[in-house]
Amino acid sequence: MKVSVIIPVYNAEKYVTKAVESALQFEEVYEVILIEDQSPDNALEVCRSLSERYDRVKFFQHPDKANHGASASRNLGIKKASGDFIAFLDADDYYLANRFDAEKDLFQDPKVEGVYGALGVHFYSEKAKEQYYKVFRNSITTVYEKHPPKDVFPGQLNMKGSFGMFSIDTLTVRRNPLLNKMQIFFRPDLKLHEDTEFLFRLSYFLNLYPGIIDEAIALRGVHEENRITEIGINKKIPAKTRSIMWRYVHDWAQKEESMPENFRIHIQRMKRSFDIATASNPKKLIMILKYLILDYQSIRSGLYNINFRKTII
């Protein structure tokens, strides 16, 4: 295996060295690609130093040296990658020693286009643990059981009951299928949940297989400056940002000619549910009544998931 590990770097001078060195421990890692995204801290100098210290570390910035966000940075990393496989890592997260154990075996089968695993949690300080333990606890982010590739996309859409989810940090994909089957990688104009939206589309186009899902193969680094932990503690903001994400998923599903109709309908309902959840009270009542009229049968038959019931309650 020749794996290109892509790390977008923004405001992560304290953590990126640990992330890089956690990837370099593996002989399978052919290169670590750092995309520095005009950090307000000293991350630029840290990235430059890492590229000088380690031959396998390559350091890039956007052509205009400006800040473009995690999506554009990952996209640039994909373009710069030259390995046969691509893996991702956030700059404040890190790999564990078993990161590529399953991948080495699974990718011997050419029909395996991607492998995912379980993500654990590491609190960088007691203050971070005190603030964000109720968000992350010590649990792992994982798909709960092993499923065939055809079930991963509907599973991620919550069409198969309690399916679970996986993280971008635990994903490894073959480079050629990614480049050939995905016209759009990460969406630069989607500022939150951009990785989730990408994983939805990826699981539709590529054959993704479970690797190690009962124990962590990477750890999410939780600290006070992490934008996701700050947002995750506020219950109202995530509903709004998820509504925006589902709008993107919905627009893609409507345009995707090969999309089965039952998937398309489910995605439409998910979008509608989050639209209702984030609407103001007067508008919310009108939307609920409209939904009851237009889609009463699906609610009555129980085909729709709990999101709508939560919205009403």
Image (cartoon, rainbow, N blue to C red):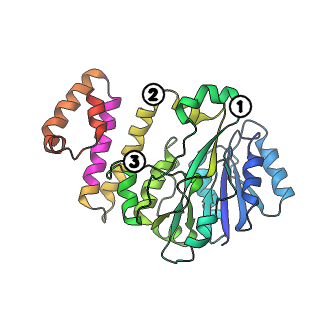
According to the picture, the residue beneath numbered tag 3 turns out to be 248
Span of residues in magenta: 264-280
Secondary structure character of the magenta stretch overall: helix
Q: Give 85 or 44, whichever is nearer the viewer.
A: 85
Between 186 and 299, the one nearer to me in the picture: 299
Name the kind of residue labelled 1 in the image.
Ser
Identify which residue, 166 or 174, lies in the foreground: 166
Q: Earlier in the sequence, mark 3 or mark 2?
A: 2
Location of the N terminus by quadrant is bottom right
Q: In the drawing, what numbered circle is on residue 235? A: 2
Asked whether disc 2 touches disc 1, contact meaning CB atoms under 8 Å apart, the reply is: no
> Label 2 sits on what residue type?
Lys
Q: Position of residue 188 (x, y in %)?
A: 53, 48
Q: Residue furthest front?
A: 214
Q: Earlier in the sequence, mark 2 or mark 1?
A: 1
Residue at 71 percent across and 65 percent down: it is 29
**What secondary structure is marked by label 1?**
loop
